[in-house]
Image (cartoon, helix red, strand yellow):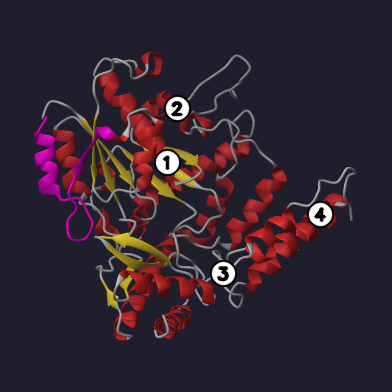
Amino acid sequence: MDELTRVIRHAAEQAAAYRRSLPVRPVARPVDHAALRTAFSRPLNRSPADPLTVIDELVAAAETGLVANAGPRFFGFVVGGALPAATAAEILAAGWDQNAFNAALSPAALAAEEAAGAWLKDLLGLPSTASAGFVTGGQAANTAGLAAARQYLLTEAGWDVARKGLGGAPRLRVVAGEERHATIDRSLRLLGLGTDCVETVRADGRGALDTENLRRVLASAPDAPAIVCTQAGNVNTGACDDLRTVCGLTHAHGGWVHVDGAFGLWAAASPATRPLVDGVELADSWACDGHKWLNVPYDCGYAFCSRPAVHADALAYTASYLTRADGAPVGGADYTVESSRHARGFATWAALRELGRDGVAALVDRCCSLARRFAEGLTAAGFEVVNDVTLNQVLVGFGDDARTDRVVQAVQNDGTCWMGATTWRGRRLMRVSVSGHATTEDDVDQSIAAIARLARTS
């Protein structure tokens, strides 16, 4: 066996052993950060080291600082553990070491993105003619979508933003809900629009856009087209905006609808939850994550745009030394803000092939069912569930804010499961997100029992 094979096999065996341990290992544990830094921060050796030894040292140094977010009882931040085929595809992608800038650098990487992108659009109910950019996650996808919106609306107004920038440009309206995700604001900062441009729309009782308030906001300047930012999946409650109504109102004023669907856009993949995103196909751009509900490895997100040429005009570039394969379609870096790019399409392709259409729907349905099981079990235990559980998000109160924070901290320290805390409508709450393919009813019941036990002494 040659050295490279031995090293890769040894690393794969270590990774597989870790993944096998996830059902029984503590999800997290209190960390001695100084000791963890010390474990990594040894003096740099002068001479080369044996690769097998390096892998063993890395495994030993990282052990106490690993969080089992790929395991069945991690319920924080809407993340799922990577599927077997997707994990293996990621190992192949690392071994192949492809640069997915364009089809000249890696024809296979671009072909995988094109095929997986078509499958995704079909599953998510998006137009088959939309572009699909494989990005790092929801932040990058939101930035790409809003960049396309900026490009389109300013071009329609007769302004070349790519050449002239924003100085002297017509003012762009940006309309967004008061419970929008923070990445929208960050994207606006990165794009030079700034957060002061946001005209805020009230949220309804579920956390979705109040469409009557939106109607009044848009009517306040009827001749000024707006970028309207919507949500498929409120980060706290899981609520989805009324996309059909929002698109109708916005397009009547010549505006652009962007859907932040980091996790909630996956509702379209199941017949049971598809009505929550009715009208999604009418929007102009969409952001979605793969490393959330599709359960592919980090980092992976998708930026879709109904106008591929606008998408590319907003983000693509060329240079004298960059060649494009003959006959190759636009894609790859043309739809992202990266140049040298990780070949994310391989893991997405593998995940979709492993699950199939019915498997994706079943994953969405099962996570929603388990979220309802959480809500029912925690309610029966005497705690307050404050949101309507329409997707995979559950918000739980334990009395006053201080006690809720104590319970959350106790749960995180205990290691049986992991939930985060959030502030919603002025209250501190435990936030439970069910997104992992490996989670079972027994995992939920173990977690409920642990929360009840810890709450009694917190």
Residue range in magenta is 196-221
Q: Which residue is mark 3?
A: 28
* Residue 97, picture quadrant: top right
Q: Earlier in the sequence, mark 4 or mark 1?
A: 4
Marks 2 and 3 sit apart, C-alpha to C-alpha, by 39 Å
Dot 2 surroundings within 10 Å: few (below 14), some, or many (20 or more)? some
**Rendering coords of residue 224 (x, y %):** 16, 26
Q: Which residue is mark 4?
A: 54
- Chain-order first, disc 2 or disc 1: 1
Q: Is residue 174 left or right of residue 58?
A: left
Q: Which residue is mark 1?
A: 141
Q: Are marks 2 and 3 in contact (CB under 8 Å)?
A: no
Quarter of the picture containing the C terminus is bottom left
Q: Nearer the viewer, mark 3 or mark 1?
A: 3
In this rendering, the answer to whether 187 lies above or below 432 is: above
User: Callout 4: few (<14), some (14-19), or many (20+) C-alpha neighbours within 10 Å?
Assistant: few
The residue tagged with tag 4: helix, strand or loop?
helix
Contact between labelled residues 2 and 4, with CB atoms less than 8 Å apart: no
| Residue at disc 3, secondary structure | loop
Determine if the magenta segment contains residue 180.
no
Query: What amino acid is at disc 4?
Result: Val
- Residue matched to label 2: 315
